[in-house]
Amino acid sequence: MRLFKPLLLLLAVLAPLSSQANTCDSGRLQSPINIASTQKQKLPALEFNYLSSPLVLANDGHTLRVRLNKRSQLKLGKQIYSLSQVHFHTPAGDQIADEIFPMGAHFLHKNSNGKLLALVVLFRLGNSNKTFDTLLSNIPKQVGPNQAIKNISINVNDLLPVTKGYYRYMGSLTSTPCTEGVEWVILKEPITISTEQLTTYKKSFSANARAPQPINQRPILESM
Ligand SMILES: [Zn+2]
């Protein structure tokens, strides 16, 4: 038995690594996706209770993260989720009927059982967004941990579209370990930012979206 111990230890170390790689490469419920055919249904309305929060930002080298204090909540059916952060992708990973959006925001939530819900807001080019301007003018120049921005509060409600119709499907984290079992909610109506705002964001962050993943017969529900 003694001879086998190092081997067993090595296997114990390697197994989680290989299962992570496996989920990204061969998982069947991966995100993002290209939303093509949907099942229209009467789905529960999204109930947003996002509150104003002191602005805390992090530049992780790939994206700008807005850290929230978890007091903001989203209710979907009977589930209540707390909002922990918002970050951005260029382009948005999710597509609708092959339309590629130049940018998207991921609002990450968790409920009391640890279940994750990612809400997606798609951005099109058009009028500028004032709240996005506040974020752009405070992007931390250095890559590093959270920075509290003095005397500025933000309400990420201002990054939501007026109508709250949505698509819903079961997916995954979009980066390693690509864990599945994440509830994805994609708002149908995009918001707009200006070309200048997109250009400013891209000066700090390069393209960082994962390509759309196979749908594999997953139902994509669409609210009526
Ligand atoms: Zn993301």
Image: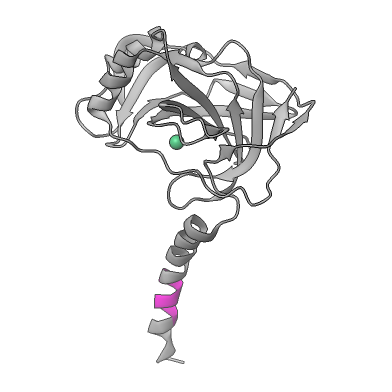
Vertical position of residue 198 compared to residue 119: above or below: above
Identify the residue at horizontal 41%, vertical 26% (top origin): 103
Vertical position of residue 14 compared to residue 76: above or below: below
State the image coordinates of residue 67 (x, y, percent, origin top left): 41, 26
Foreground of the two, 114 or 141: 141
Farthest residue toward the right? 42
Residue bounds of the magenta highlight: 8-13
Give the overall secondary structure of the magenta segment. Answer: helix
State the image coordinates of residue 189 (x, y, percent, origin top left): 58, 18
State the image coordinates of residue 199 (x, y, percent, origin top left): 28, 20
- Does the image show residue 113? no
Does residue 185 appear left or right of residue 153 in this picture? right
Residue 206 magenta-drawn?
no
Does residue 131 appear left or right of residue 170 in this picture? left
Foreground of the two, 90 or 47: 90
Farthest residue toward the front? 98
Vertical position of residue 86 compared to residue 17: above or below: above
Farthest residue toward the left? 142
- Does the image show residue 208? yes
